[in-house]
Image (cartoon, rainbow, N blue to C red):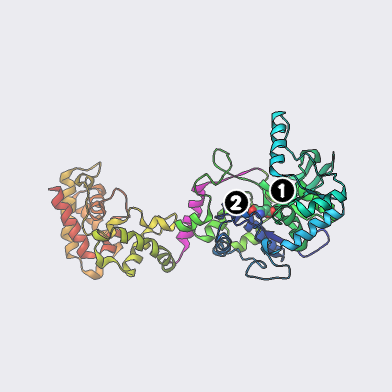
Amino acid sequence: MKNSNSQKIRVRFAPSPTGFMHLGGLRTALYNYLFARQNKGVFVLRIEDTDRSRLVKGATKQIIQTMHWAGIDYDEGPEKDGNFGPYVQSERLDVYKKYAEELVERGKAYYCFCDPVRLKTVKEAQIAAGKPSKYDRHCRDLKWEEVVEKLKKKPHVVRLKVPDHRLIKFKDIVRGKVAVNSDDLDDQILLKSDGYPTYHLANVVDDYLMKITHVIRGEEWLPSTPKHVLLYEAFGWKLPEFAHLPLLLNHDKSKLSKRDCCVAVEDYIKQGYLPEAMINFIALLGWNPGGENEIFSLDELIKKFDLTKVNKAGAVFDLEKLNWINGKYIREMKLEDLAHECKPYLESYLKKIESEIDKSLVNDQYSKAVVKLLQERLNKISDVTKGIDYFFLKELNYNPKLLVFKRSDQEKTLLGLQKSLEVLEKLFDEQWNQEALNDILRKVCEVNGLKPGDVFWPIRVALSGAEASPSPAELLEVFGKERSLARIKKAIEKLK
Ligand code: GLU
């Protein structure tokens, strides 16, 4: 996509450091990034921290870390200077002040001296009369001399002089033509009494000064855009292109909000979702490239992403799909890497059950063998600790009834276990591998006229004590001869 006058494409992600990074924020960052990369443009990170009451310490750092984790690198921003900095709004206060004053001089904005008490009274009266609550423009037409006098003594804000009865129109790449009547807009505060700009002023001034060509952001900012359009007009600046990305929804189509579980990207990181999978999943929230394939690398996304094809309708957040995608990426990992990712989760889990485990099994080699068995089954890295205690416990504690498969009985099960034990005892260590072990169990069935349920099932339960686990041959191999035989003997005792 070319910008109308072939300017270099510059986009920005402009989060407010108010806490964790929302999934929607990550999607906004990603779409900006993809758009910048595919157009050989520039991706700016700008920190919008002018609402001092909502600031959360450490949030900016967290945003930067999360973007880095996701592989969404920005070209200009905090810690990465370009020619348009500073990129943190609280470091640009003089800029906003200058532009606010310029608007006042041009008659496009005005000083307002109304105190909170008066504003509250006006608002209450409006509500009581069933009218929309808007500033009543009390200070809009003060005489200049009066303004000068008051400026010396009274706290003040600067408000935008919203014109009456105007249809404000703009085009949005996602939503098409948008039109809003100016009568529905308030005389927006641009500069607050503490000298900080509001979001609207700072956002527009910075997008202009930072030469932003495309404003790509969440739909929740669509209602602010007409105010921004008025500001661009008031300054006499050309509008950037706008693209408002669809809301993220729960399955019941309600908006995915902070109150819902798991909207913080950091929570997914903690649970061991992989950045590649997360990016892949997030990219498909509101856009899809068509076709059957749903697995895309970041490079493929850069090639395929199409801002003009982003959906208007809200995107339903489907955790099952994320798990499926993440699982796919886990299956593709090198065992070495997967074991490395699993290590901290396993370590903290084993610490919790420290007193019950066989300490000789706490080593990287054994953990790697366990992880290898689980690779096919994991949806996220933290799953590696689910139902796996039998790999490490000194003693298994399970109900002997579990040893008997539902289509078998006590007698056949006992026979299955004893016959298997006899053969396994004779097996040399060098032969102790999955394939050979599988053959042996199959032969035990054949020779003794038993069914798999009489042999494979009880051996598996003898080793795991669990209703579901990897296959008996897989467990036998990982456990090794000595530990396997000991568990099978225990199971025989339990059954007798
Ligand atoms: N600071 C706003 C936010 O926190 C940015 C909105 C915009 O991109 O214009 O999302």
Q: Which mark is residue 41?
A: none
Q: Is residue 122 above or below residue 244?
A: above
Q: How many marks?
A: 2
Mark-to-mark CA distance, 2 and 1:
16 Å
Q: Nearer the viewer, residue 283 or 477?
A: 283
Apparent side of residue 290 relative to residue 409 in the rendered image (left or right)? right
Q: Which residue is located at x 77 percent, y 63 percent?
A: 209
Type of amino acid at the residue the image marks with label 1: Val
Dot 1, how many residues are within 10 Å of its Cα: few (below 14), some (14-19), or many (20+)?
many
Image position, residue 222 (x, y; %): 71, 46
Q: Nearer the viewer, residue 95 or 42?
A: 95
The range drawn in magenta is 313-334
Q: Which residue is located at x 71 percent, y 67 percent?
A: 85
Find out if the beta carbon at label 2 lies less than 8 Å from the nearest ligand 1 atom.
Answer: no
Circle 2 SS class: helix
Image position, residue 423 (x, y; %): 18, 60
Image position, residue 32 (x, y; %): 67, 58
Task: Say which residue label 1 marks.
Answer: 174
Q: Nearer the viewer, residue 345 or 135?
A: 135
* Contact (Cβ within 8 Å) of mark 2 with mark 1: no
Q: Quadrant of the N terminus?
A: bottom right
Chain-order first, disc 2 or disc 1: 2
Q: Which mark is residue 24?
A: 2
Circle 1 SS class: loop
Q: Which residue is located at x 62 percent, y 70 percent?
A: 79
Query: Could you tell me what secondary structure mostly forms the magenta stretch?
Result: helix
